[in-house]
Image (cartoon, helix red, strand yellow):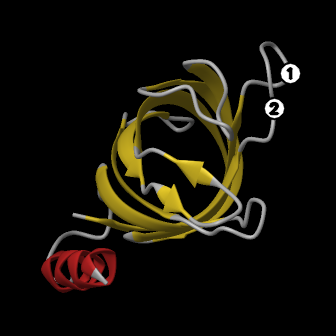
């Protein structure tokens, strides 16, 4: 519920800002893992190039279900974005605060694609270790961002 309220406040604040924004706040719904869902909050900054770098930090809520228990995970990522009109694809690396059943190891790859219009961005992101260490379940995020 807190993430919905935060997203609403950021949306209201962004309506009076210029259409191009380099700083974005986001909320994500996580893919179900072993029957347990989660969510995430993020903040990101983009460089001004035609194909910008995105630097993102965020937190993935803990899962406390009967099938899967994971701690809260903080993450920071750096990704290169390739823009095709309003569409984009991106890839980069991420560091995480915890080694969990879903995100094994502290280093992950972050890939994604999405659509951006003015201050609003919708993207599907995947964070995993790409099979480099231990388990490789990974997290899928449906991320909605508002620029300000």
Secondary structure under the numbered disc 2 in the rendered image: loop
Quadrant for the C terminus, please: bottom left
Label 2 packing within 10 angstroms: few (<14), some (14-19), many (20+): some
> Would you say residue 85 is visible in this rendering?
no
In whole angstroms, how far apart are the C-alphas of marks 2 and 1? Answer: 5 Å
Say left or right for 36 vs 119: right
Q: Which residue is mark 1?
A: 131
Say left or right for 47 vs 29: left
Assess whether mark 1 and mark 2 are in contact (beta carbons under 8 angstroms).
yes
Identify the mark at residue 136; answer none if there is no mark.
Answer: 2
Residue shown at the point (31%, 60%) measured from the top left? 25
Q: Position of residue 124 (x, y in %)?
A: 68, 60
- Determine which quarter of the picture holds residue 102: top right
Label 1 packing within 10 angstroms: few (<14), some (14-19), many (20+): few
Residue shown at the point (30%, 49%) measured from the top left? 22
Residue nearer the viewer, 53 or 145: 145
Residue nearer the viewer, 2 or 91: 2
Secondary structure under the numbered disc 1 in the rendered image: loop
């Amino acid at each position: 519920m807190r993430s919905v309220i935060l997203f609403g406040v950021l949306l209201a604040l962004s309506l009076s800002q210029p259409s191009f924004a380099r700083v974005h706040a986001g909320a994500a719904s996580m893919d179900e893992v072993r029957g347990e869902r989660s969510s995430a909050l993020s903040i990101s900054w983009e460089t001004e190039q035609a194909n910008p770098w995105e630097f993102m930090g965020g937190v993935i809520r803990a899962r406390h279900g009967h099938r899967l228990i994971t701690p809260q995970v903080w993450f920071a990522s750096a990704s290169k974005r390739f823009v095709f009109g309003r569409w984009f694809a991106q890839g980069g690396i991420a560091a995480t605060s915890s080694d969990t059943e879903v995100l094994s190891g502290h280093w992950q790859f972050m890939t994604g694609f999405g659509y951006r219009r003015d201050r609003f961005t919708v993207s599907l992101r995947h964070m995993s270790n790409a099979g480099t260490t231990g388990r490789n379940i990974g997290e899928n995020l449906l991320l909605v961002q508002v620029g300000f």
